[in-house]
Amino acid sequence: MPVIDIAEVAHLATPGTKLAGIDLGTKTIGLAISDARLAFAHPRPVIMRKKFSVDAQALLSEVQKEKVVGIVIGLPVNMDGSEGPRVQATRAFVRNMEKLTSLPFIYWDERLSTVAAERTLIEMDVSRRKREDRIDSAAAAFILQGALDRVRTLQA
């Protein structure tokens, strides 16, 4: 399935379904999964990046296990709204994933998601070492939560 707009998710996400959120990094893939009511994003362990085929299989295994109906992926646009190399890499990742799954992808502006995730982990008094292990999944949860909030607004 192609990339879809967040407005289309409101029709796709029926009661009992889940969405996934990912924060695509160069070393890890942060992962979060919604609850079945599409109200809350829950961080999952990061996927350590190796090569695309291994990364894709690990990601697809997790989303199939959770019965996910769509994947929200953070789009790392620059603060001025321009698109740089990281956006191109994210779009290339999605193009390659589309060959392996029928799940739709939804791009979500992820500006400041990592900053917000780190602030939250600091407020929770998580040590620096543990923050490094959790930051990408926490950022994925922020990305997914933003999309979930928007879906609820569209469904109202």
Image (spheres, rainbow, N blue to C red):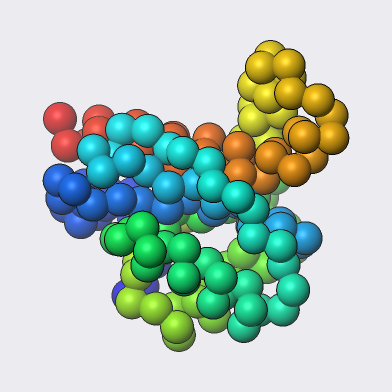
In the figure, is residue 67 to the left or right of 134? left
Q: Is residue 22 above or below residue 141?
A: below
| Number of residue marks | 0
Q: Is residue 11 above or below residue 152?
A: below
68 and 78: which is toward the camera: 68
Q: Residue at x 30, y 50 (%)?
A: 18
Q: Residue at x 62, y 72 (%)?
A: 55
Residue 15 % position (x, y):
15, 46
Q: Is residue 139 visible?
A: yes
Q: Is residue 107 above or below residue 127?
A: below
Q: Residue furthest right?
A: 129
In the figure, is residue 27 to the left or right of 141? right
Q: Residue at x 81, y 25 (%)?
A: 127
Location of the N terminus (image quadrant): bottom left
Location of the C terminus (image quadrant): top left
45 and 144: which is toward the camera: 45
Residue 9 % position (x, y):
26, 52
Q: Residue at x 46, y 63 (%)?
A: 62
Residue 43 % position (x, y):
53, 41
Q: Is residue 132 above or below residue 100?
A: above
In the figure, is residue 149 to the left or right of 16? right
Q: Is residue 109 visible?
A: no
Residue 32 % position (x, y):
50, 46
